[in-house]
Amino acid sequence: MRLPLLLSASLLAFGCKPAPQVARYEVKSDAAPAPAAAPAAPVAAQPAPSPAVAAPMVAPASMKAEAASFDAPKWAKLPAGWSVGPENGMRKATWIVAGPDGSKAEIAVTVFPGNVGGLTANVNRWRGQIGLSSASGDEIAASAQPAKVGGIDSQRFVMASTDGKKGLDAVMTPHKGATWFFKMSGDAAAVAAHGAALVAFLAESQLP
């Protein structure tokens, strides 16, 4: 009986080996990591408008409609050298003035409800139209000259471009919840020659 027992023990020793364990290893790659996606090219910022180049005033449709509802003033007799200019739906009047040595200027009359942005914004827009940089509110207030439009107190602003070629003479009049603008602009010689005539003409005219 001893021999069979030994054989059985041997078979058990060699036939019943435990299952081999599977070892797991973390393998790190030596390859360089994939480059990150390049950031999108930034959108170039639009340059801010130069203070010397004023954008034209853009009135909403409602403001245009209300402006059109204002009656035209009763104008005084046109001064010598003034002629009626082409019609413009946004204006109450347009005149062309002839100055010395063939110089010319245009007078535009507009009216809008409210203060249309205020004194500083309006004067700086005019300054930009002849290539001048923006001025502070205090500087603008100090440059205002008194004027009358049909007896109504108004403010007058006279300016010229830095090269002396362009001029602007404008009067701003608040009246009945609206603001009237009388702007003469063009060749500096023509603007200067008709400045006194503009002031006298407006003083003798009557707003509605």
Image: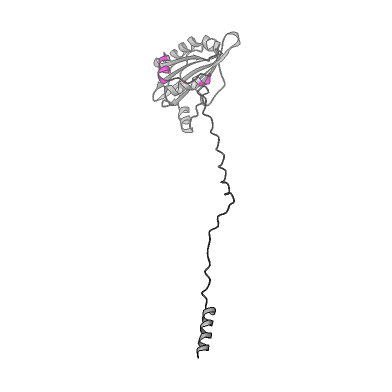
Residue in view at x 51 percent, y 85 percent = 6
Task: Name the image colouring.
Answer: one colour
Q: Residue furthest front?
A: 2
> Foreground residue, 93 or 29?
29
> Foreground residue, 138 or 150?
138
User: Viewed as shown, does residue 113 lie left or right of 168?
Assistant: left
| Location of the C terminus (image quadrant) | top left
User: Viewed as shown, does residue 191 lie left or right of 177?
Assistant: right
Q: Residue furthest bottom?
A: 1
Position in image of residue 33 (x %, y %): 57, 49
Residue in view at x 53 percent, y 71 percent = 20
Tell whether position 135 is magenta. yes
Does 96 appear above or below 18? above
> Foreground residue, 51 or 42?
42
Position in image of residue 153 (x %, y %): 39, 16
Q: Total number of numbered labels?
A: 0
What segment carries the magenta color?
128-142
> Foreground residue, 187 or 39?
39
Position in image of residue 52 (x %, y %): 52, 21
Position in image of residue 177 (x %, y %): 39, 25
Tell whether position 123 is magenta. no
